[in-house]
Image: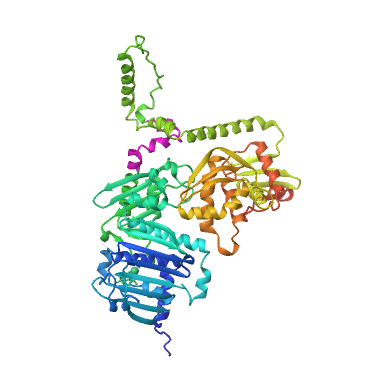
Amino acid sequence: MTDIIQLLPDHVANQIAAGEVVQRPASVVKELMENAIDAGASTIKLIIKDAGKTLVHVIDDGKGMSVTDARLSFERHATSKIRSADDLFQLHTKGFRGEALASIAAIAHVELKTKQDHEEVGTCIEIEGSTIVSQEVIVTPKGTSIAVKNLFFNIPARRNFLKSNTVELRHIIDEFHRVALAHPNISFNLFNNGSDVFNLPSSNYRQRIVNIFGTKTNEKLVPVDEDTEVLKISGFVGKPEFAKKTRGEQYFFVNDRFIKSAYLNHAISSAFDGLLKNGTHPSYFLNLTVNPQTIDINIHPTKTEIKFDDEHTLYALLRSAVKHSLGQFNIAPVLDFDRDATLDTPYSYKDNGASIPKIEVDRSFNPFKEGDAGLGKQTTSFKRQTQATSHWDGLYVGLESKGNDSPEDFSEMYFESEESSSSLFDDENEMDKVQTTHQIHSKYIVSAIKSGMLVMDQHRAHQRILYEEFLQNMTIKEGASQQLLFPLQLHFTPQELVLIEQLKTDLQRTGFVFSNISEASVEIIGVPVSVPESEVSIILEQLISDVENEVPDSHFSATDLLAKSMAKSLAIKTGQTLKKDEQEHLVNRLFACKEPNVSPTNRKTFITMSVDELDKKFI
Ligand code: ADP
Ligand code: MG
């Protein structure tokens, strides 16, 4: 019998380990930045070239390494951070596995320069695919600089698997945000291809968020603070009216480590219950501090998921802390408006008939007489009334705030309800007319055709129609534009503005007119005829997220993407009731399209069923 098992050589084992640790340039960014933090740095610079494919370079002013440590740091399972398995439950550092540098050095060209504070000179080590190619004594400032070049140079398959620069840069910026948000007291810089993308001075948490996401963010933040024995919560949630269609700004940090948790995310969503428009997600930036002994970080390769001893309690505490903040800052009642207020009537009031409000007129009141008590009397009686009802959970506080703060939302709400009721009536009136189309479940439109029956998906069909229309506007003729009464000022982060600049020409062809694109905002004075003003920010937000997340390099066509994205945002949604003429119009327009069969994302727009097929069903 021959033995067939062999120990893998180190460089092969390292490459395998690298597969877990390093998925893309952003993973290198994360590992290097975390090492810099563990080294006690107060300033960390990140320099990127070609979205990290050519270079990821992190420079810190932390404690540096001795010559021996510099050498050892590239060995697998070499770490200064834990000594025994018990330490895994006492973690105060980001790293502990001693794998990152070994993994990175296995699949890239790495140059390490490091010097400890008390030393005169430092060490420079160059290593390529796990092989040390040089080691020198050098003059270098205190701290560590690690440059990782030509990632995956020896694994072409992995290199080819990388996404476009836009997508990879997005991942890098995400990691950068996560680390920078967890450590507002450390100053961070990010340079991409020589330009300064982020310059974040040491600051408090609110300022850090604002420095990253733009000055407009400040007014959106509601502080959350809760200190209990098991859990300390601090940070901010975004006001519900600023909730986004995309899940961008959702951050949990547990003991200064960014983590993903669908369960805790649910706790936040449920705290926002009833406050958000459908399909929008709240922003949050929350720091949870727990006893390190009550969590296990060692359950996931990238340490972004952790196991809590008592998740249920955390859930409940988090939910109530967020709810409390939303209530305290008078945000909750504002949105209670979207619900049927009668359902909220406290039980004890349920059977009391509504009393007609009385207007007390003080006939002796003389407005020209100075110091007349009449006015005072009225005010006090009003005050007393509010006090008496104040235990109605502030139900009617919403009336005032809604009216004051966001008149637009108000009108929108009425518009929506008017629309749905009127279309309902139309349907009833038309019951006895000849019907060519019929809408079912506010989703499909059914129509009789020569051969039998057609069932059309209203959302997908409308996407196809809009897509072809936008595409035509962009490529053949200019789309008509409607001028806005007041310029629309929209705020974006610097990297979002870079994308808008790139797409500007195409956007203009669809009918957008920009009067000014500055460092932090965009001013729009005209929009395509088919685009309601209220949708503009959602369209651009969706567009940016589509560009950043979905497009691999090879098929990238800005025009096509823009048309798809706008069609997606503007198409009639599932759940929308359509009037008869709207239904017919939709069917006719779909069949006037070049490719009516599929939506822009290649999904069926309609199906047909012949009379024969129907007949068979009745056998
Ligand atoms: P881990 O962080 O899990 O310990 P790494 O492979 O990331 O493993 O790093 C190995 C060791 O190298 C660390 O434990 C630390 O002692 C040292 N090291 C890495 N980066 C730095 C740095 N920027 N400054 C000082 N020491 C560092
Ligand atoms: Mg590390």
Quarter occupied by residue 419: top right
In this image, 40 relative to 503: left or right?
A: left
Q: Is residue 81 above or below residue 178?
A: below
| Residue 6 percent location from the top left of the image | 41, 85
User: Is residue 325 a member of the stretch shown in magenta?
Assistant: yes
Residue 560 belongs to the span the image colors magenta: no
The residue closer to the viewer here, 201 or 270, is 201
The picture places residue 33, in percent across and down from the top left corner, at 36, 65
Q: Residue furthest bottom?
A: 1
Closer to the camera in the image, 143 or 375: 143
Please tell me in which quadrant of the rendered image residue 403 appears: top left
Q: Is residue 185 left or right of residue 517?
A: left
Q: What residue is rendered at 69% in x and 43% in y?
A: 447
Per the rendered image, the range of residues in magenta is: 323-345
In the depicted structure, whether residue 97 falls above or below residue 407? below
Looking at the image, what colour scheme do you see? Answer: rainbow
- Measured as percent of width and height from the top left, residue 89 is found at 27, 64
Most foreground residue, 562 or 331: 562
| Displayed-image quarter of ligand 2 | bottom left
Is residue 3 among what the camera can see? yes
What's the magenta bit mostly, secondary-structure-wise?
helix
Left or right of 284: which side holds 482? right
**One can see residue 460 in this view:** no
Examine the rendered structure and indicate whether residue 41 appears above or below residue 409.
below
Residue 113 at x, y = what percent? 34, 74
Q: How many marks?
A: 0
Residue at 40% across / 54% down in the picture?
Answer: 262
Position of the N terminus by quadrant: bottom left
Please report the residue visible at 31 percent of the width from the left and 25 percent of the height from the top: 388
